[in-house]
Amino acid sequence: MLRIAVCDDMEVMRREVVRALKEYFMSRAMEFTYYEFANGPELLHSDKEFDLIFMDYQLEENTGRNGIAVAHRLREKSIDVPIIFLSSFPNVVFASFEVNAFRFLVKPINPVKFKKAMDDFLKTLENEEVIILRIEGVNQIINAREIIFLEGDGKYCIINVDTKQKEIHCHDTLSAIEEKLPQAGFFRSHRSFVVNMKYVSSYDNNEITLTNGATIYISRKKYSSFHKAYIEYSKRYGYSG
C-alpha cells in the first residue's frame, strides 16, 4: 500500500490534497494510506516511511523555515523520497530544483495537473521493481524486493512478503504472477513455488530454507539449474546464503 505524507501548515490545504488523493486512487481502485503534518519538525521526527510527500513551499512562513529547508533536511538524512511541492507563487518553482523535487504544483490545485503528476509518479514505480495485482477488487502495489516466495494453489496464489502483512492471497495463478516479476532474482524451483533468491538461507536436493524459517520444495529436475542460478546471483549481488 502506498504511504503518502501531506505536510502543510494550513489544515484546509491538507484537506484539499487528501480529497484529491482519495478521488484519484478511487478512480483506479487502488488503496493508499496518508499521514498529515502541520509543520516540518513533525514530518522530520516521524518514524514512518513514505513513498511520496506533498510539501507546502511556504511552510512555517512565520518562522522563516520553508518547505525547501525541510526537504534539505530529508535529503541530508538520505531520504530520497519523491516530493511534490505546493505553492501559491509559480516563480519559486526553480528553488525546488535544489532538492530534486519530483513536481511543483500551484495552489489552488488544478485537477488535470494533479492527475498528471500522480500518473507520472506511478510510472516511476514501474521502474522500481513493483508489481500491481488486483486483490479483493482492489489494485495493490507490491514491491517485488519484499516478496520472499510465492506458492501456487490451483487458480490462486499465496504471496509471502517480508512485511507485517506476511501473506497476500491473490486470485491469479502462480504462472500469471511469475510473468510480472523481475527476471533477475526469482526462480521457479517447483511447479508450486517461485522463490526470491535474496531470501535463500540454505538448500539441498529436496528443499530450500528461507531466512524467515520457511521451507519450500525444489524439484530434482530443477536443482542443477537453481544451484547455478543461485551461485551467479550470489556473486552478482554479494549474498552468500
Image (cartoon, rainbow, N blue to C red):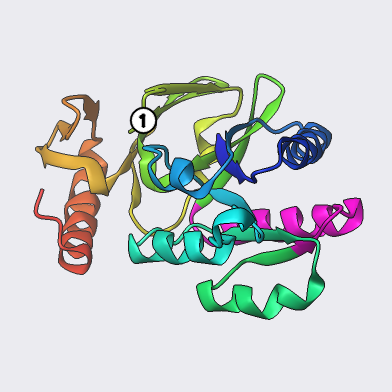
Of residues 201 and 29, the one nearer the viewer is 29
Percent position (x, y) of residue 87?
75, 61
Q: In this view, does 167 lie to the left or right of 229?
A: right
Give the quadrant of the N terminus.
Answer: top right
Q: Which residue is drawn at 24% across and 58% down?
A: 229
User: Is residue 73 at least partly visible in the picture?
Assistant: yes
Q: Which residue is drawn at 71% across and 75% down?
A: 92
Examine the rendered structure and indicate whether residue 152 appears above or below residue 1: above
Specify the segment rendered in magenta: 105-129
Examine the rendered structure and indicate whether residue 122 appears above or below residue 25: below
Label 1 is placed on what type of residue? Answer: Thr
Regarding mark 1 in the picture, which secondary structure is present there? loop
Percent position (x, y) of residue 81?
49, 57
Q: Is residue 30 left or right of residue 114?
A: left
In this figure, which residue is indicated by the disc labeled 1? Answer: 163
Q: Please say whether residue 112 is one of the residues in the magenta stretch.
A: yes
Q: Residue at x 56, y 45 (%)?
A: 131
Q: Please say whether residue 55 is one of the residues in the magenta stretch.
A: no
